[in-house]
Image: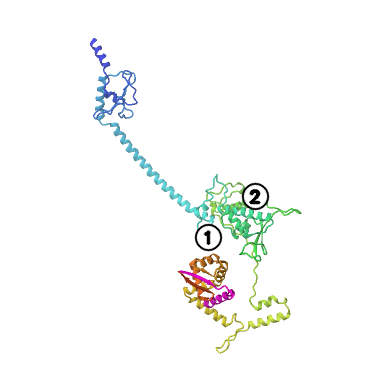
Amino acid sequence: MEQRRVTDFFARRRPTPRAALRAKPPGCAPRPSEPAPRAPAKRARPGTPPPACRRLRLPGSPAGPGSPATPGSPARTSRGRKIQKKDALSAGQPSGLAALQDKDTISELQSCLQRARALEVRVQALKASAQKGAESTSPPEAEGRPEQPCGEQLPAYQRFHALAQPGPPGLVLPYKYQVLAEMFRSMDTIVGMLHNRSETATFAKVKRGVQDMTRKRFEERNVGQIKAVYPTSYRFRQERNVPTFKDGVKRSDYQLTIEPLLDQEAGAAAPQLTASCLLQRRQVFSQRLLERAKEHHRAFLASLSPPMEVPDDQLTRWHPRFSVDEVPDIEPAALPQPPTTEQLTTAQEVLARARGLVSPRMEKALSQLAMRSAEPSSPVLPGDPLPTTNLPHPPQVRAKEAQKQLAQMMRRPEQELRLQRLERLPELARVLRGVFVSERKPALTMAMACARMVGSYCASMSPGEMEKHLLLLSELLPDWLSLHHVRGDTYVKLDKAADLASITAHLALRARTEGL
């Protein structure tokens, strides 16, 4: 008995082996009787059995003897060695539960595959039925959907403009209607500005301002659309003698004028187009555009199968299949056109128009001229002289014109260049005379004369090209302009006493002669 107590005492005092310290995982709490390890556990050598805390266990399997002990259990060194040996033997044996689980997994996969195949067959059947339903309902939808007038597809930002609007879906105007509303707002602003300062608003002025504000083209067709939507907004007229500051428009030409229609009280001054009035007119125009969109929506609902009908006061959003941005354009209303002036070409027309308006003597002369022009012309024989009364030009003029055209067709490039220089010589002669008068010198170098003439001539020309003109001028008029070569430089000397008018006339005649 005493010997057994001594053996137990020394067994408790025996130090814990290193393998046992290494076998403890980080999550296992140290036993109360064992001291905490001072250094981190080293890697186990090959052949060492895995620790009890790290071995895989199947769910539901009972805890073996190698499972971590509870904090209060005493540690036995000899029993630990036996447990490790048992664990090593049990780790090498095949697990029956794993094989059973593999069989269950295979059966589950097969059942999932069968369900997926059944779902695929069902989806294909649903697609086929939906396609048949779309084919059956496509004719009424095609009837309700308007076609594009031009036949070409619009850009995506216009076709899907209503879908891209922020906020909840509602009664969104088509893109083309919103553009027209913006044009009306800009047009009303410009017309109001001109009307308030008592200036006549013409289409040319309004067009320029609207295009600057909207960055879009504004034509008379858009004005006709505005008139079709809001006919009581403006009064359009064709007027003459309207002050204009454009070179392409004459004062006597007809212009389309625009005048706003405002409510005027009796005895009051001319009404002004104020900001509140502009806002009211803008709201009226937008409301009328919305009414037109609702008309197309009602036609679309009537074309459905079965047809639908929704009161306008209860309509808060469009039908999901209604293409808002594909509604047809607004047909423009007719605008006043300038009166067509009748042109009288024959004496009969002049006599018919002037009968009763001129004196009897003038009427008799017109009747004789009409009878003479109505008589058939007799054939011309080869020996007879050509009649010259009805010819627009004498034969000499026509022959000269034909000769000039023939010369132009057969003229070479160097001849064309010489002719252009000859046409410039009269003006260059005047410039050269002015240069010599301003410099007050009897002779100038060629470089200095060319530089002064380049700065004084109306057209841009290089000094080298100007020198060629001076050489040609000295060739045609050697008595008036002479060239002198002194020490490598060329000097130009001019006869200031000569008549400049006769010189320029001679140069112009020479240019006309060579141009024929």
Q: What's the residue type where badge 2 is placed?
A: Leu
> Which residue is depicted at the point 59% across and 86% down?
378
Residue nearest the viewer, comparing 281 with 214: 214
Residues in magenta, as a range: 488-516
The type of residue carrying mark 1 is Cys
**Residue 273 x/y as whole percent:** 68, 52
Residue placed under numbered mark 1 in the picture: 150
Label 1: few (<14), some or many (≥20) within 10 Å? few
Instruction: Find residue 433 and report its image quarter.
Output: bottom right
* Residue 151 horizontal side relative to residue 337, left or right: left
Whole-percent x, y for residue 35 in the image: 31, 19
Circle 2 residues within 10 Å: few <14, some 14–19, many ≥20: few
Mark 2 or mark 1: name the one nearer the start of the chain. Answer: 1
Question: Relative to residue 113, is residue 478 depicted above or below?
Answer: below
- Residue under the image location 57 percent in, 82 percent down: 396
Q: Outermost residue, bottom direction? A: 383
Nearer the viewer's eye, disc 2 or disc 1? 2
Q: Dividing the image into 4 quarters, which one contains the N terminus?
A: top left
